[in-house]
Image (cartoon, grey):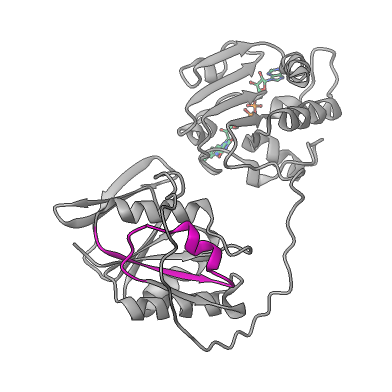
Amino acid sequence: MEPILVLLHTEGDGALHKASLEALSVARALGCAFDVGLVGGNVNPALAQIAGCGARRVLALDGADFAVSRYSTDCPAAVALFQETLPAVVIAPCTARWQRSLPGAAARMGGAADTHLTGVALVDGEVEVSRWFYRQRIEATFRREQRPWFLLVEGGIRAPYSAQGYAPAIERLTLSVKPRTEVTGMIAPQGSTQTIRPEAELLLVAGAGWTKKQKDGAIHIEQAGKLILDLLANTNASLGSSKSLVDLSGEGHAVLPFLSHLNQVGQTGSTPRHPKGLATCCHGEEPHAVGWRFVQDRRAVNLDANCGWARGKADVVYVADAFAVMERLNALLAKR
Ligand SMILES: Cc1cc2nc3c(=O)[nH]c(=O)nc-3n(C[C@H](O)[C@H](O)[C@H](O)COP(=O)(O)OP(=O)(O)OC[C@H]3O[C@@H](n4cnc5c(N)ncnc54)[C@H](O)[C@@H]3O)c2cc1C
């Protein structure tokens, strides 16, 4: 049994993101005593979310200096919370903010850090973790002797903790920091133009076929873009893409303007975890389909009955014209 610190940061509104509540569940599932450390501008809303979690101590470093993600304040904040609790193992969500700062904190403490962990378990009294290597092709389970050990866990591996009872008592630490970087604001895409939605029920994937000549000998980019955006609007699906389609812009071809490499799914792209996926105008090549490994129900629309999806990569393949299928689908969805 090793002493554990669960390190969480709050969001702009002072609440904890789902990924943080999932990391708390990962720690609770180990059955060891643990403390919670909170970092953020205002941590009061977070306290209600962790009510009844069973932490021995809940400590916080809060205030304007810790409101924003910044290495020069996040790293010392993590170190201060660490020094106050002296854990052997630190568990934290694998958020962009912690990924940037916690490996530095681990190094300052003479410890080790592992990111993107998909499993944490206690085996024969020792902490054992798992993660994927070689672009999601090899899954390894391993232990480390080095302590402290900072574990950054992926989202979706445990249900988020849900509060019970009263908010815990809190111990507030103080730390004087002199940040040289000032965060002056945040620029984010509008909700309506944000096409990557990790929590969506459905992943819609667009392939290069949307930009190819169709049976009339012409390409129909505008129609393709409208069909795809209408489906997203009708279903709130997340939008993925094949590499070929997002590469086209770099090659000077006609492109769908709302796609970037961030949408790319596959060996050199992302590995999303949606319950359902629909691939359209995309061939189902192995380097692309490898990114589909966590999508549970996979369907594809392709003109080619011999496409990669038909060779065991999808549960259902519709051999059909995706332009016609999507048009009909959108009409049916609009009637709902
Ligand atoms: C090391 C390496 C890593 C790679 N990593 C990735 C990766 O991460 N992600 C990735 O996507 N690719 C990756 N690739 C590329 C991958 O091998 C494929 O080249 C790519 O995925 C093909 O994209 P596509 O299916 O969109 O295009 P295409 O292969 O051109 O397929 C287009 C499909 O559209 C269909 N089609 C055309 N018109 C219609 C219509 N009207 N209705 C229905 N179907 C239609 C065609 O039948 C065809 O099957 C990688 C390759 C390598 C070598």
The quarter of the picture where residue 45 lies is: bottom right
Q: Is residue 173 magenta?
A: no
Relative side of 139 to 236, left or right: left
Q: Quadrant of ligand 1?
A: top right
Residue 109 visible in this rendered orientation of the protein: no
Relative to 244, residue 176 above or below: below
- Quadrant housing the N terminus: bottom left
Q: Position of residue 229 (x, y in %)?
A: 77, 32
Relative side of 271 to 184, left or right: left
Identify the residue at image location x=60%, y=36%.
Answer: 200
The one of 5 and 102 positioned closer to us in this rendering: 5
**Magenta-drawn segment:** 32-57
The one of 270 and 213 positioned closer to us in this rendering: 270
Residue 187 visible in this rendered orientation of the protein: yes
The one of 329 and 25 positioned closer to us in this rendering: 25
Q: Position of residue 75 (x, y in %)?
A: 48, 76
Q: Is residue 36 magenta?
A: yes
Q: Position of residue 242 (x, y in %)?
A: 63, 34
Relative to 321, residue 28 above or below: below
Relative side of 150 to 239, left or right: left
The quarter of the picture where residue 127 lies is: bottom left
Q: Position of residue 12 (x, y in %)?
A: 63, 64
